[in-house]
Amino acid sequence: MSATKKIHILFHDAGGGHRNAAVALKAVCEQEQRPWEINLVQFQELTDHLDVLRRLTGIRIEEQYNILLRNGWTWGSEHLLRILQLTIRIFHRPMVKLLANYWLEHPADLLISVIPHFNREIAESWASVYPERPFVTVITDLADFPPRFWIEPVGEQIVVAGSERAAKQARDFGKSEGKNLFQASGMILRPEFYAQQKESCAAMRRQLGLDLKLPTAIVLFGGYGSNVIYEISQHMDAARLPLQLILICGKNDKLAERLRARQWNIPVHVVGFTREVNRLMHASDFLIGKPGPGSIAEAIISGLPVLVECNSATLPQERYNTEWVTEKKVGVVIRSFKNEAVAAARAFLEPGKLNEMKRNVVAQHNRAVFEIPEFLAKLLAKQRPEPEKEQQAEASPTVANAGR
């Protein structure tokens, strides 16, 4: 049997966090020269012909999700979520069969999922083909949103939780440390967020054409941007706050054009899609954005407190994140950017307030992207050799029955 282990990581592009987690995990394993061959598998492409919404609208379900985010159409998202989950249950059997056939044709020693909703189907399909090989779900949210979001009550699913809340939820579903639960110290982040910055904050601001001493907020709403960025910036500008803004528009080109076309009273730097968020955070003092787990984790590792919003339009799986921010005293949570952003920003600018929150930020220690490969290595070390011919013979009839 080859010394090189094969690993599949399942991700999708509904939001940017799932791909980021998959890419980050692969990158750090390669940097550490792990004897693994890691294959990133785009789940949407794998299951495209089972996408009911695409049949009806011509638009992939993940792109429909991103359209909602770009436009802020997230009111009632919990009801849409439950409809999606019902649809997944209806297509459970064909999904399990499709996935099982893929695993048979593309064998691996370990399967990792960094996506929600489909983990029961993934677990059943994997166990039907490779019952002795581990299946791991890495939760990319600070907490689960049960039922049927991240954690499934099946023993075949091993859960990696990035917070005490998520670990407790996993235990409530019957998971246990040492068997099928591992608690990491936070969310997976790209390795460059841990690298020592060669440029000073002043040098970065000089490059961006910003004031070297003025407090700086980076405004970030994920890789697909959001039109609320314009609204927030407009309010800050009208109030003429002693503040400057770095506005990250992601793939929302229309938003970037609109922001660049406006005349501003305060210093503003507009950025489109970028892979240098870590450098731009280094030039900032705090983050304004949606309470996504990735954005919050990136801000915290960069030493930035956060200003986030939580209300009925907040995605249900992200609402706990705002509780975490309040509990750890690493930022401010408001009900409405439209009505409260200016007052909240003023609070950040009060003497001593920003430094106080920064001290709380520094107290957080997230090393998840380095801890998880160690955990995976232990799982692979426990794996018993399986003769390839016997495995193929056993797997073939199993796949035929998968999902029945």
Image (tube, rainbow, N blue to C red):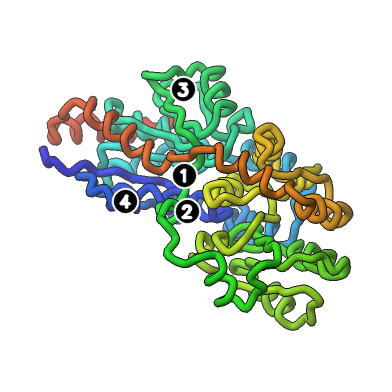
Quarter of image, res 338: bottom right
- Identify which residue is drawn at 23% across, 25% down: 382
Specify which label sits upstream in the sequence, 3 or 4: 4
Specify which label sits upstream in the sequence, 1 or 3: 3
Q: Can residue 274 be seen in this view?
A: yes
Query: Which residue in the structure is indicated by mark 2?
Result: 20
* Labelled pair 2, 1 in contact (Cβ < 8 Å): yes
Q: What residue type is labelled 4?
A: Asn
Q: Give the spatial CA distance, label 2 vs label 3.
A: 27 Å
| Percent position of residue 368, x then y | 43, 39
* Labelled pair 2, 3 in contact (Cβ < 8 Å): no
Specify which label sits upstream in the sequence, 2 or 1: 2
Q: Give the spatial CA distance, label 4 vs label 2.
A: 14 Å
Q: How crowded is mark 2: few (under 14 residues within 10 Å), some or many (20 or more)?
A: many
- Identify which residue is drawn at 54% across, 60% down: 282
Specify which label sits upstream in the sequence, 4 or 1: 4
Query: Mark 2 or mark 3, which is nearer to you?
Result: 2
Specify which label sits upstream in the sequence, 2 or 3: 2
* Disc 1 element: loop
* Disc 2 element: helix
Query: Mark 4 or mark 2, which is nearer to you?
Result: 2
| Numbered mark located on residue 39 in the image | 4
* Labelled pair 4, 1 in contact (Cβ < 8 Å): no
Q: Give the spatial CA distance, label 1 vs label 3.
A: 24 Å
Instruction: Give above or below for 187 relative to 221.
Output: above
Left or right of 1, for residue 290:
right
Q: Nearer the viewer, residue 121 or 285?
A: 285
Specify which label sits upstream in the sequence, 4 or 2: 2
Query: Which residue in the structure is indicated by mark 1?
Result: 188
